Image: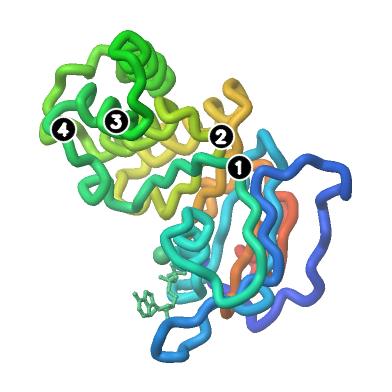
Amino acid sequence: MAVRLPPSFGAITPTIQPMTPLAVDVRDLEFRWPSGASVLSACSLAVPKGEFWMLLGTNGSGKSTLLRLLAGLLEPANGSIGIDQPVGFVFQNPDHQLVMPTVGADVAFGLVAEQLPPAEVRARVQDALSAVNLLDFQRRPIYALSGGQKQRIAIAGAIARHCPVLILDEPTALLDPDTQIELVSQVQRLVKERGLTALWVTHRLNELDYCDGAFLLQNGCIVARGKPDSLKQRLMTA
Ligand SMILES: Nc1ncnc2c1ncn2[C@@H]1O[C@H](COP(=O)(O)OP(=O)(O)O)[C@@H](O)[C@H]1O
Ligand SMILES: [Mg+2]
């Protein structure tokens, strides 16, 4: 179901206790394109370690720009970004992300910069593929995977690199409803079993059932945050 936003959500409800350890801590972020167009302004959000949070907002509200800032692909004009490193990034379209001919080679490719011994690379690839239930697919050509399997390989790449934080930009946008639910529930399980932290952009409200909390971005600013149920309720009745 698509998100329809009311003009304003009023006051922000803080849900995070001061002493909660944070994996993502963004404060007063500002970003504008070289044209001068402002995308983010006074944008602040925090994701506690070990939790699965979602980011919602209409098209053009700045969600992808915010994630690209978190991944270090863009520089903010102002504000601060604290995020546990390395960050694993999963794109909407896995064909923009998977670069090697086979599954095993693709996951191993992400480890090249670390110059690990071959046995360690093999162990990391196997661990990552079993985490996403695709261990048997190690020799499979990338072209012979479904969209959902490709997204799981992209996630395996981040797990192999031991990324404590996953940021995922509409990873289910190109998936059918069954595969969509399979992916979101798998990420929920990975977050809980491996102590990861995930920030997931979506416009599909049924995915909110799987997260610990959600943010609403409107005109480049977080205007609401809280429990998924209350945000879902507000968006559905808007
Ligand atoms: N590379 C770019 N150069 C200039 N403007 C851009 C670029 N990418 C996105 N924008 C603009 O920035 C705004 C926010 O875009 P985006 O972050 O992609 O929003 P969302 O992901 O929420 O749909 C939009 O107005 C969009 O047109
Ligand atoms: Mg986007």
Would residue 11 be seen by someone viewing this image from the given angle? Answer: yes
Q: Is residue 1 visible?
A: no
Tell me which label, 4 or 3, sits earlier in the chain: 3
Q: Distance between the residues labelled 3 and 1?
A: 21 Å
Is the shortest distance between ligand 1 and the CB of mark 1 under 8 Å? no
Specify the amino acid type for callout 2. Pro
What is the quadrant of the C terminus in the image? bottom right
User: Which label was assigned to residue 164?
Assistant: 2
Bin the neighbour count of mark 1 within 10 Å (Cα to Cα): few under 14, some 14-19, many 20 and up: some
Residue at numbered disc 1: 84
Instruction: Find the distance from the CA under tag 2 to the CA under tag 4.
Output: 25 Å
> In front: mark 4 or mark 3?
3
Residue 140: x and y in percent read 15, 22
Q: Is mark 1 on a helix, strand or loop?
A: loop
45 left or right, relative to 196: right
- Asked if the residue at label 2 sits under 8 Å from ligand 2, the reply is no
Which three-letter amino acid code belongs to the residue tagged 3? Val
32 or 91: nearer the viewer: 32
Instruction: Of the two numbered discs 2 and 1 on the same chain, state the one appearing first in sequence.
Output: 1
Residue at the image position 69 percent from the left and 38 percent from the top? 49
Q: Residue 142 carries which label?
A: 4
Amino acid under label 1? Asp
* Residue 40 in the image, given as x and y percentages of width and height: 57, 76
Tell me the crowding category of disc 4: few under 14, some 14 to 19, or many 20 or more residues within 10 angstroms, Cα based.
many
Q: Are marks 2 and 3 in contact (CB under 8 Å)?
A: no
Q: Which numbered circle lies on residue 112?
A: 3
